[in-house]
Image: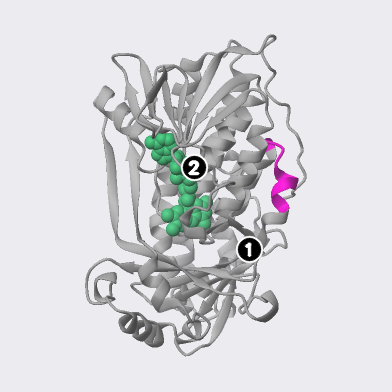
């Protein structure tokens, strides 16, 4: 992925601007990028955000929270002309660095070409960049500390609580709801349409912690890797920050023998880390204190049957499709939503919002379902199977098959993370066929030398059509 901005043609502005303005609920990652792209078309945008302006007020108690940004997200940012601006915020991570209980380390590369890396990026840093860019556009106004309370379909309004006891209303027309996983707008849409949302909470939660910078702001562990301490039913991960620290996340069941429920004192936490992550503990002197200061997060998958109502409301990002974080794709998928919305607006000559919203839902819902499934599967891979010799052999074989047949076999992880031109749903379908092939070919093998690679290549050619022909 290059960071230069190819500047694809922006949808042409309406001659006198678009009299039909758009209301965006939520100035998080999806809401801001969607608004930036919409404003380029000359559409007047009003954005309402529940929280204070994070550029002026320290949120999340100043904690560094970071995310993995990959090709899909970068492609959408480049569409908004933000490729170069985002580059200084990014730290490339070339693979998973596995930390075994005995302290040994193994790097499992994500890809096999130099550009096949993913990037650690600060969530508030990225949100700040998006807000700065958004406010440069004369068509945009952003109102912070305005909490959307949902849509009133009877009265045709969307209502915002200003925090000072007053409320303001906007017409329920062309409202883009990017108000996150807990979206009040989603609840309104469901109530109005009698559609359902399946919200499946994971039995595991998460806790964000810090591995601080060493002397002189030095990173204390490999800067260019996503670190994982996989322990079977649970895991610890760490992503680098620009200030020398790492944001560490513990994923653990809420209940049960090894769970958050059993970590009730500093001594419990330190004892748990000493047993399970002794090398990390040495570098995390504050873990006992931080553990109780930081909230335990919940995770889940939200599959909502309905995202659009006429030309009135469209749900995007986590509001439409919450997914678990184990493929590092929630934000990437939300950014891809924004890119798709932009493409649809550009392709609707008479700017038919009813069509744009309906088409968006029809195109994106199968994609969101596909990445939701793959993200759930990836949790088991990250915390467990990644440690197995057979998994490592499967990875080596997958790279070899990709070298031999690059138009037919691309490892599923690579399709999701490095190929925004391949839809998630195609990655999922082809990934299933590929997983079957890899399982078959690695049965009884201990090394690549045990596998007849010419026969393996022939099998690929037999079972997988070239990518371009797949759909
Ligand atoms: P949000 O970022 O949640 O933004 C919603 C915005 O709406 C917020 O600003 C919120 O304050 C505002 N809002 C909420 N309610 C209202 C209201 N009533 N009125 C007005 N405003 C409102 N994704 C990745 O791609 N890579 C990763 O590595 C990754 N790691 C993750 C790790 C964890 C632990 C978690 C939980 C998620 C992770 N994700 C990751 C997912 C990612 O955080 C989300 O998919 C992404 O933030 C979605 O963007 P969004 O704008 O839809 O929602």
Can you give x and y, in whole percent of width and height, for residue 323 in the image? 40, 49
Q: Is residue 204 above or below residue 274?
A: above
Residue lying furthest left: 256
Instruction: Tell me which segment is drawn in magenta.
Output: 79-87
Give the quadrant of residue 400. bottom right
Residue 52, disc = 2
Residue lying furthest front: 164
Residue that numbered label 1 is attached to = 111
Tell me the mark number nearer the camera, choosing from 1 and 2. 2
Can you give x and y, in whole percent of width and height, for residue 234 in the image? 36, 72
Nearer the observer, 89 or 354: 89
The crowding category of the residue bearing disc 2, from other C-alpha atoms within 10 Å (few below 14, some 14 to 19, many at least 20), is: some
Residue at 48% of width from left, 79% of height from top? 389
Q: Is residue 155 above or below residue 34?
A: above
Can you give x and y, in whole percent of width and height, for residue 448 in the image? 58, 76
Residue 80, disc = none
Distance, label 1 to label 2, CA atoms, is 39 Å
Residue 431 drawn in magenta? no
**Residue 319 in sight:** no
Can you give x and y, in whole percent of width and height, for residue 251 in the image? 38, 67
Nearer the observer, 401 or 193: 193
């Amino acid at each position: 992925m290059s960071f230069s901005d190819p500047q694809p043609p922006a949808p042409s502005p309406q001659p006198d601007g678009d009299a039909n303005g758009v209301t965006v609920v939520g100035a998080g990652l999806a809401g801001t990028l969607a608004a930036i792209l919409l404003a380029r078309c000359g559409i007047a945008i009003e954005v309402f955000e529940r929280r204070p302006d994070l550029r002026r007020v320290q949120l999340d108690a100043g904690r560094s929270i970071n995310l993995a940004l990959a090709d899909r997200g970068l492609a959408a940012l480049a569409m908004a002309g933000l490729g170069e601006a985002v580059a200084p915020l990014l730290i490339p991570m070339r693979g998973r660095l596995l930390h075994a209980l005995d302290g040994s380390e193994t790097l499992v590369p994500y890809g096999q070409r130099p550009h096949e890396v993913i990037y650690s990026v600060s969530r508030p840093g990225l949100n700040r960049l998006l807000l700065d860019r958004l406010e440069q556009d004369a068509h945009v106004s952003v109102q912070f500390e305005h909490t959307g309370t949902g849509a009133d379909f009877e009265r045709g309004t969307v209502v915002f609580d200003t925090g000072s006891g007053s409320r303001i209303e906007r017409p329920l027309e062309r409202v883009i709801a990017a108000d996150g996983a807990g979206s009040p707008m989603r609840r309104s849409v469901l109530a109005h349409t009698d559609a359902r949302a399946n919200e499946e909470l994971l039995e595991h939660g998460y806790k964000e912690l810090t591995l601080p910078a060493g002397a002189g702001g030095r990173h204390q562990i490999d800067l260019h890797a996503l670190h994982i301490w996989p322990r079977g039913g649970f895991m610890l991960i760490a992503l680098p920050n620009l200030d020398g620290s790492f944001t560490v996340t513990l994923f653990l069941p809420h209940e049960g023998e090894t769970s958050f429920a059993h970590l009730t004192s500093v001594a419990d936490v330190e004892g748990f880390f000493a047993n399970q992550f002794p090398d990390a503990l040495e570098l995390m002197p504050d873990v006992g204190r931080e553990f109780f200061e930081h909230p335990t997060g919940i995770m889940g998958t939200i599959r909502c049957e309905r995202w659009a109502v006429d030309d009135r409301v469209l749900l995007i990002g986590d509001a439409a499709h919450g997914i678990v974080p184990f493929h590092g794709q929630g934000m990437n998928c939300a950014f891809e939503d924004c890119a798709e919305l932009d493409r649809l607006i550009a392709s609707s000559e008479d700017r038919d919002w009813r069509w744009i919203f309906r088409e968006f839902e029809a195109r994106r819902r199968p994609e969101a379902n596909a990445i939701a499934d793959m993200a759930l599967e990836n949790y088991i891979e990250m915390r467990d199977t990644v440690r197995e010799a057979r998994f490592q052999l499967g990875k080596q074989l997958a790279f070899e098959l990709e070298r031999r047949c690059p138009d037919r076999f691309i490892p599923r992880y690579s399709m999701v993370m490095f190929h925004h031109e391949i839809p998630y749903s195609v990655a999922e379908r082809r990934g299933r066929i590929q997983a079957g092939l890899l399982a078959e070919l690695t049965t009884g093998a201990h090394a690549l030398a045990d596998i007849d690679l010419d026969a393996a290549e022939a099998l690929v050619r037999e079972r997988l059509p070239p990518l371009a022909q797949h759909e």
